[in-house]
Image (cartoon, rainbow, N blue to C red):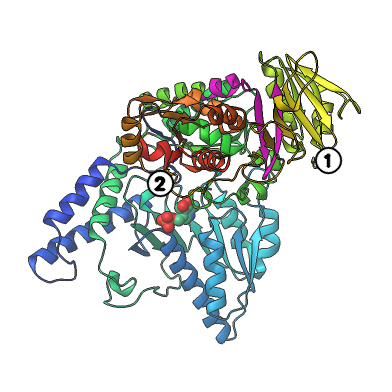
């Protein structure tokens, strides 16, 4: 198993050892309630006050309010509530204060969602308007200049979490200053703490939320700065803690841990300097360019945080890249952690006008200012390994499934892998298929769509210089010793005898199912639906009970020496890091090649245990085999991620 290299610091960071120690000490010896008047309470109060004073120094906020929150989402919420209550007040007094709530188009979702929420709850009916960004990801100051006179409240982040683009805060401040009735201004500073210098009380910023877990403090602790004189309304009322600004007994262990991080920032020496971080990122950028020819960065590096790289590899989806990185033990993400579980393209890259193809392939790599040379060295080496894994991937299977948006196409190879036929290739995958075939010097003999095809054969044919379409009625295409022939709607493939394919020798059927006379072991390969293959005349077995957790999988493998452990991850992932489970090496059969192998497992049944990264693909593999009639197949739920 690879050691883990965590390069997703913009999502969250590990906890600084000194912060763990400070939190533990706070729980052991400083557990008092800071509102209590006895000695235990006074000790806690001293810790609270000391940490706030430290925060003021680090943030450059000698004046104004600095309060502890549960994190940036709460800070944002409080700032939005405060600003919107002030707008309501001003309106009630007949003051003109603008009708727009303006927020940067690339803000974290916490901002527009909070604006919409409180606008609705307070019945303000202000118009929410996204302030566009340019191709460089920075706010369009010309548009801001136009809209500022109408703005009641403006929200712009200091640096973006997906791209690392650093905002031109001086430019925004200057534009806001020009306006006759300057709007209130919130700057989400989450991604800048510890990476860029801050001097809040010298700025015009009214509200600045921070989050501890983005800089080596634990989750659940944050800070909110409010400029002196800026309107304030508490979000939480109760016992009057935090001078009545934020009720609720303070999270003392979190505050102590955040204090340790702030102390390290103030003292210097723990975190890398801006110049050192830039040099580290340069090395990572060079390794990426070296590893993935054609790689593009999605934001100009000169205007981004020195710890963030957002890039795309043309023709390779984010999902594929993440799978390869994950297999190599490199933890990166496709965008913000909050949207990682949603398949939607990045609204941040969309707002920058990044082409859809690039956005579909985007990956964010981010590291924290605690990184050292050895870590960067290891990351560069691992990145190169991922690049090789992706380039070396070549189709070795007889039958490969091409999957795109729920539709399947198929590539049939000869045994040497030197020639192939494409059936119903998805148009969106045509460039990938062409590049893959060229990379392994595989000749495309023919490409065609069956009657249910999606028309991708034209696109692939053009790229590979092959005339698309079936060669003609009564024709057959030879592939080594095998033959593909047409029978009505169906295309039949199998071993030819004396140049003729008998129905009893058919192995795969495309374009139709239920053909009389075809061998019972033949697999019908579908264009739509799961499973993508079926066996006519076979009753599918139920797929309940296919899950084995890591412990029961180990026990099963131990008690069934004949069981085959099968890694169904794609080849680049396997190349980046081979799968093992409890000392047993897995046979590698990627999900895309499962149909080709299924026939063999059905002919000679033996217990099968499928495994993949997270358990999704292995569950599909086990379901597919059950539906083909294989009774003894299971998968490792949770995958290598939990079993490792
Ligand atoms: N703002 C930005 C720019 C962020 O990256 C995040 C974290 O994902 C947040 C706000 C929300 O922070 P928290 O997780 O502390 O609520």
Image quarter where ligand 1 lies: bottom left
Q: Position of residue 449 (x, y in %)?
A: 81, 35
Using a 10 Å C-alpha cutoff, classify the residue at mark 1 as few (fewer than 14 neighbours), some (14 to 19) or many (20 or more).
Answer: few
SS at circle 2: loop
Which is nearer the eye, 285 or 3?
3
SS at circle 1: loop
Q: Position of residue 435 (x, y in %)?
A: 71, 24
Q: Which of labels 2 and 1 is toward the front?
A: 1
The image's mark for residue 12 is 2
* Callout 2: CB less than 8 Å from ligand 1: yes
Q: CA distance from mark 2 to mark 1?
A: 50 Å
Which is nearer the eye, 244 or 183?
244
Per the image, is 393 magenta? yes
Which is nearer the eye, 416 or 405?
416
Task: State left or right for residue 220 relative to residue 605.
Answer: left
Per the image, is 635 magenta? no
* Quadrant in which the N terminus is drawn: top left
The residue under label 1 is: 451
């Amino acid at each position: 198993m690879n050691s883990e290299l965590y390069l997703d610091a913009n999502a969250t960071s590990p906890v600084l050892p000194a912060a763990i120690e400070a939190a533990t000490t706070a729980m052991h010896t400083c557990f008092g309630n800071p509102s209590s008047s006895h000695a235990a309470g006074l000790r806690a109060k001293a810790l609270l006050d000391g940490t706030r004073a430290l925060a003021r120094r680090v943030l450059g906020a000698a004046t104004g309010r600095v309060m502890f929150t549960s994190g940036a989402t709460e800070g944002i919420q409080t700032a939005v509530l405060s600003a919107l209550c002030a707008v309501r007040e001003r309106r009630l007094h007949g003051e003109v204060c603008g009708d727009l709530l303006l927020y940067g188009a690339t803000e974290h979702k916490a901002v527009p969602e909070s604006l919409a929420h409180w606008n609705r709850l307070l019945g303000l009916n202000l118009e929410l308007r996204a302030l566009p960004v340019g191709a460089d990801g920075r706010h369009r100051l010309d548009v801001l200049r136009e809209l500022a006179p109408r703005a009641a409240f403006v929200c712009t982040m200091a640096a973006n979490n997906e791209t690392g683009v650093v905002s031109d805060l001086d430019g925004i401040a200057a534009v806001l200053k020009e306006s006759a009735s300057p709007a209130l201004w919130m700057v989400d500073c989450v991604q800048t703490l510890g990476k860029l210098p801050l001097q809040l009380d010298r700025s015009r910023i009214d509200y600045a939320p921070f989050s501890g877990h983005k800089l080596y403090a634990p989750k659940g602790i944050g800070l909110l700065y409010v400029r002196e004189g800026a309107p304030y309304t508490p979000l939480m009322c109760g016992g009057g803690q935090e001078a009545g600004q934020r009720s609720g007994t303070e999270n003392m262990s979190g505050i102590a841990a955040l204090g340790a991080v702030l102390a390290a920032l103030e003292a210097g020496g723990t975190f890398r300097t801006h110049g050192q971080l830039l040099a580290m990122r340069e090395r990572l950028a060079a390794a990426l360019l070296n590893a993935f020819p054609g790689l593009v960065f999605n934001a100009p590096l000169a205007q981004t945080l020195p710890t963030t790289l957002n890039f795309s590899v043309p023709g390779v989806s984010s999902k594929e890249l993440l799978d390869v990185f994950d297999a190599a033990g490199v933890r990166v993400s496709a965008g913000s952690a909050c949207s990682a579980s949603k398949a939607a393209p990045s609204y941040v890259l969309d707002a920058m006008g990044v082409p859809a193809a690039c956005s579909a392939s985007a990956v964010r790599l981010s590291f924290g200012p605690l990184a050292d040379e050895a870590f960067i060295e290891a990351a560069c080496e691992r990145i190169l390994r991922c690049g090789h894994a992706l380039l070396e991937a070549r189709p070795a299977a007889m039958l490969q499934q091409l999957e795109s948006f729920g539709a399947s196409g198929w590539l049939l190879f000869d045994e040497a892998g030197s020639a192939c036929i494409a059936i119903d290739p998805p148009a969106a995958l045509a460039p990938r298929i062409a590049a893959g075939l060229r990379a392994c010097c595989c000749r495309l003999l023919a490409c065609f769509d069956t009657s249910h095809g999606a028309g991708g054969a034209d696109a692939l044919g053009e790229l590979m210089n092959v005339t698309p379409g079936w060669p003609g009625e009564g024709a057959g295409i030879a592939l080594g010793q095998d033959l593909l022939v047409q029978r009505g709607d169906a295309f039949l493939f199998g071993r030819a005898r004396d140049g003729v394919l008998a129905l009893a020798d058919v192995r795969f059927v495309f374009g139709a199912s239920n053909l009389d006379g075809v061998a019972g072991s033949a697999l019908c390969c579908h264009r739509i639906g799961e499973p993508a293959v079926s066996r006519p005349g076979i009753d599918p077995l139920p797929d309940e009970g296919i899950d084995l957790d890591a412990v029961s999988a180990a026990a099963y493998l131990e008690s069934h020496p004949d069981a085959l452990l099968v890694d169904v991850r794609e080849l680049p992932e396997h190349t980046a890091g081979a799968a093992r489970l409890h000392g047993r090496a897995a046979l590698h059969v990627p999900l895309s090649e499962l149909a080709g192998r299924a026939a063999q497992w059905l002919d000679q049944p033996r217990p099968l245990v499928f495994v993949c990264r997270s358990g999704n693909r292995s569950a599909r593999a086990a379901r597919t085999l059950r539906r083909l009639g294989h009774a003894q197949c299971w998968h490792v739920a949770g995958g290598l991620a939990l079993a490792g």
